[in-house]
Image: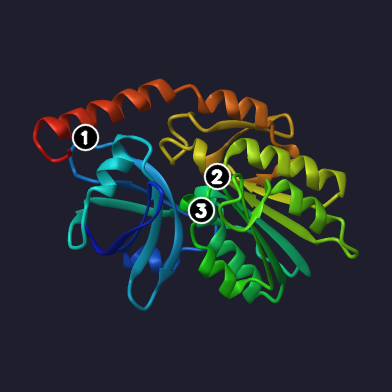
Amino acid sequence: MPHKIVSKRQIGEEVFWAEVEAPLVARARKPGQFIILSIDSGYSERIPLTIAGASADKGTIELIWQRVGKTTAELAGLNEGDEIANIAGPLGTPTRIDQFGTVVCVGGGIGNAPLLPIATALKQAGNRVIAILGARDKSRMILEDRFAEISDELIVCTDDGSHGRRALVTEPLKEVCGHDPKPGHAFVIGPTPMMKFCCEVTRQFAVPTQVSLNTIMIDGTGMCGGCRVEVDGKARFVCVDGPEFDGHKVNFDLIIKRLNAYKKQEQQAYEQYRQHRCKIGLDG
């Protein structure tokens, strides 16, 4: 069954948002879960994307992605009214939403997208939500307005100081963890090095920390083994055992090495795709 793109727009530097028809997924999804999509019914790549939001009444889900490879570029090239051939989900283990008191939610770049439904659910559960959002610069800051709606306190940081506070997210995170009382729980989603250093901060203050390792997924069903990670000294598969884990038990150094395994092939596929589009006159 094809899934029509109801609405689509660019929301940041190389970042796109789309509302897509997927009524079964919209009714069943929970915060922290993801879908697997393939753009056409032929041999297109299957990629995992976190469900950034959903409307059971409208039968739609929100998808947010960054154009970094061939398939995400193809997805960015679709327009309202176009169709995505296949969407499977919801997949993965949902986030454990509980009453922690005060929670700190830290997002970095595209990580703000999967963090939003988690922060929203935490607020609805009665928690006080402190959100810390970081990006390289203003053009890469996404979803700030939506976090402002559900956060009791919002701290915005950019590496270059072009928007909000000039700082890495670890700086305000350390300040928040130093409050008395300290946060009852932390949720961190973003680039792997960012999550690693955030966990080093929260470990100092003994603040339990949940991280999402969705960026390392490939197949999304546990069959390819590409998302194998080490958690508490044991092998885990992000797509079926996660995508969320105790950040204080994750071997981030191993993940960083694995993330570089397919980078060359990804770049080559994207460059071939761009050259083909230029050749047939679709891009300048």
Mark 2–mark 3 Cα distance, whole angstroms, equals 7 Å
Give the x, y percent position of residue 248: 76, 41
Q: Which mark is residue 274?
A: none
Q: Nearer the viewer, residue 176 or 205?
A: 176
The quarter in which the C terminus is drawn is top left
Give the x, y percent position of residue 180: 91, 64
Image vertical order of residue 194 relative to residue 4, above or below: above
Task: Describe the element under mark 3 as helix, strand or loop.
Answer: helix
**What amino acid is labelled 2 in the image?**
Arg
Mark 1–mark 3 Cα distance, whole angstroms, equals 37 Å
Q: Which mark is residue 43?
A: 1
Residue extending furthest toward the left: 280
Query: Can the viewer see residue 250 in this picture?
Result: yes
Asked whether the residues under the numbered discs 2 and 1 touch, taking CB atoms below 8 Å apart as contact, a structural biologist would say no
Asked whether the residues under the numbered discs 2 and 3 touch, taking CB atoms below 8 Å apart as contact, a structural biologist would say no
Image vertical order of residue 252 relative to residue 156, above or below: above
